[in-house]
Structure formats: C-alpha cells, structure tokens
Image: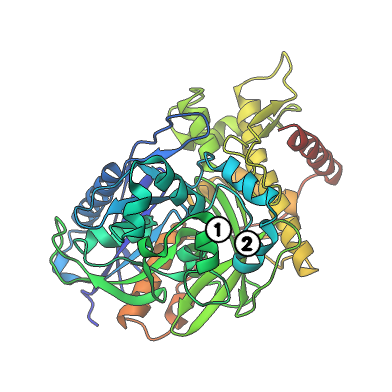
Amino acid sequence: MTDTDLILAIDQGTTGSTCLIVDTHLRVHGRATVEFPQHFPKPGWVEHDPEELWGSVLTAMQQALSAADADPANIKAIGITNQRETSLVWDRKSGTPLHRAIVWQDRRTAEHCAQLRAAGHEDRVRDQTGLVLDPYFSGTKLAWVLDHVDGARARAEAGELAAGTIDTYLLWRLTAGTVHATEPSNASRTMLWPLRGGGWSDELCALLGVPKAMLPAVHPSAHEFGATQDVPGLPDGIPICGIAGDQQAALFGQACFDAGEAKCTYGTGAFVMMNTGEKIVPSGHGLLTTVGWQIGDTTTYCLEGSSFMAGAVVQWLRDELGFFSSAAEVEALARSVDDAGGVILVPAHAGLGAPHWRPEARGLIRGLSRGTGRAHIARAALEGIALQITELLDAMAADLGAPLAGLRVDGGAAANNLLMQIQANLVGLSLQRPTMLEATALGAISLAGLGSGLWSDTTALRDAWVQDRAFTPSGDADAIAGLRKAWAEAVALA
C-alpha cells in the first residue's frame, strides 16, 4: 500500500450513476454523477435501457478520474454498489439484452405475485427468503421477460441466456463478458436465494419459473470477482473486489458493524436497515429479513423496511409539477410556511412497501383548501417521506421489543435539514448524520479495500466515520400525534 493507491467506487443508482476516486485513508479525490433516462412505457412500469445505464457509468468514471487528476494505473481495486432488485436478461455470447432492465419500482408482476399468494405460497417464500411476495423483487421480473420475449424461456433453459441484478451486469461489462457473478446481499433480493444457505433454490426457481442455468455464481461480498478488460479509460487487470446492494453497502459504509446498529438512507426511495449479526430475525410486523454482507465464511443479517418514494417525490414535484428547477430548492420552499396547512401527501406513486405491501396503492394528496399553495404541498411531501420512515421504525421497534437507541442517516435527501428535523420529531429519536453522505459508495469502497487486502479489518473504517450533525427531537407532542393520525387515515385511502 502506498499514498498513491486509489480505489474506484461505482454507485449505480436508480436515476444516476456516481463514481468516486478515494485513497486508502478514505479521502475523496474525485467524484462525478451522471443521470440517465427513466422509461415509463405503461402506468406502473419503470424501465432502464442497459446501454444508457452503462454509458452513465463510463461517463461518471471518466469525469471522476478527471476531477481527481488521477492516473488510472494507481487504481488498486474497484467496488460496486447498485440499485438492488432491478434486473435484466442478456445473451451470453453477444451480451445483447433481451429487454430493457425492469426497475425495482416496477409493478407489472403484481398479478403474478397475487396468484402465488392465492395459491398459498407466501408463507413458504417468506420462511425461505425473508421476503414477501411482491413485484419489488427480482424473481418475477425475470420470469416476466422469459414469458414475454419470443423464445426466451427455451434459450434460458438451454443455458444461452444470462440474468442478474445490476451489479452482475456491470461486472459482466467490466470484465468483457468473462465473469457472471454476484454476492449474497443482491442474491437475497431475488426470492430465489434461501437465507439459510444452500445456493439458488430448486424449489423457488421452479415456483417462480426461473431456470437456474441463467443465474450467476455467488461469492462473498469482499472477494476478487474478476478484473477489468477492455473498459474505456481503465487499464486491464484492475481487480473488482467488493460488491453489495446499495442499502447493505450504506449500512457497511455507516460503520454499523455490530448487531443493533441501524441506518436510514434517503435516496430515490428510503430504507431503514438494522444489523442483527449472525442471527436471522423474522419480522412479524411487515419488515424484511435479508442478508447484509458476507465476509469470508461469516454472513451478517439485517432487518429492513423499504419505502419506494423518498427523493423521487421531490423529483416528481420538480419534473412533473414544475414546483422548482432544482431538488435542493424544496427545503427553502417548505420552510416558507410553518406547517403543511392540513395537507397530507402519501407518496405511494409506486405502491406502498413495508409495512403495508400494497402494490396497488397509488399516491394521494388530501386536505387541500383554497389557501393551499406550493409551499404547503412541498412541506407535506417532506412530511410524507418522514412519516413513511416513522412507520418502518415503529415496526422495527415492535419486532425488537424495544425502540432503537439511535439512527444514522445518509443519502442525498439527508442533506435536507428540515426533513431530518421533521424525522427526529416524528420518531422521538436522535439522528446522526455523517460528513460523508455517500455511504453507499463508501460501503463499496470499504468492501473493495477488504477484498483486495488494502485493509485487514474494519478498524480504520470505523475510525473514519465522522459526525457532521445530530438532530434531536423537539416539537409539540399533540401536533405530532395529530399528524400521525391524519397520516394513518390517508394511507388507508391510498
């Protein structure tokens, strides 16, 4: 290890790709984010063009290297973190995708999931995978492609097709099609990977209609998966040594290495995740049990609550309603009023996730009056994001039998001080925000450092966590109780 050793993190998200160039002291030398288009071919459908996605990664990488004025030859390892359940199918020989990637927010397989529930399979799926039968997860997305592209199912069974989540696709592209692999935090989001081990499940693959022949190899999260080959702007031979789904990577990046430590990431969606150590903790309150990461032979598990719309609500106000030109303007607009004026906004645009799991739900604005203005709706949007997280934390406390001691926060929307204060007030819990909000990328960097041997353990990673600000609860208890009651009434109508 030298002072010039660098790590490249690829953080491939729902609306854009971010790349960071970081040294072994976790100092950021360069960063860049490149957005790419979202495709909405039908109501409830969300797709990504794989070439547009890959192009955004390449551009972000080149811009980050330029910003760092870094020699690519000094990159000693690459880490990947990704939007998790988004998945696609491609030809093993040509690398050509059979269809656009189907995004985690996509609802097209709701009927398939309902049929599986009606046939009595939900309890078995939940016991095996820790997940609920919901179109959120990858398995039914892959089955949909096989059932709607001519000849795809026969080709998949013959081993001609490869499938994977976005980490798998990026790994394939980075290695010029020589590596088809993933790791347990992503595999555990497919409904095809049992939490208790044993590899891809014959039973679950048969139930969902996904041939095992198309699925990737699964390695530990910190592992040398392969090396770069024919990547524009990078030399061949750089090892890809760390991969994790974005929320698990954020938990790792927040240095929540011990059981009981928890974080909430406010990105396109918002996700609460708590480390439960080597113990698999089933949820009785609508949360998910999932893999956090695997280091060596040790697997760490988590409880998770997911809400599908967080930063995406602000983007909706910006892009579809034209409330402002930049998402960062939402805080000033929402601060311009003392409260939401009785307006409740339920951000169920892509259905309701935990703890409700209602894919048919849709967004709702309630309580409009003649005096309602843009500022009231903007504030109601922030409150709607925070109220969703409050429900998730309530469910987590119910599963644990005790409230959480604290919560670390990260993600782009965590920079919004008003949102963070609203959140602290609603949950009655102190929130700790680090100086580096890009915890997902930091998790990928950390895993890559471990997988490549740049670090021998997590001590340096824990020491590198620095608090920017804490948000402590305040506000009128009666007003908070009234807001929570109005929220529950509105959610029932969504």
**Where in the figure is residue 72, as x and y percent of width and height?**
16, 64
Query: Which color scheme is applied?
Result: rainbow
At a point 18% along the width and 62% down the height, the residue shown is 70
Q: Quadrant of residue 401?
A: bottom right
Location of mark 1 (residue)? 207
Q: Would residue 478 be found to the left or right of residue 153 on screen?
A: right
At a point 55% along the width and 66% down the height, the residue shown is 203
**Where in the figure is residue 417, as x and y percent of width and height?**
58, 46
Mark number for residue 73? none
Front-lying residue, 35 or 300: 300
Q: Quadrant of the N terminus?
A: bottom left
Amino acid found under the numbered disc labelled 2:
Val
Badge 1, how many Cα within 10 Å: few under 14, some, many 20+? some
Q: Would residue 146 be found to the left or right of residue 207 on screen?
A: left
Mark 1–mark 2 CB contact (< 8 Å): yes
Q: Is residue 204 visible?
A: yes
Numbered disc 1: secondary structure: helix
At a point 31% along the width and 45% down the height, the residue shown is 98
Location of mark 2 (residue)? 125
Q: Would residue 137 be found to the left or right of residue 145 on screen?
A: right
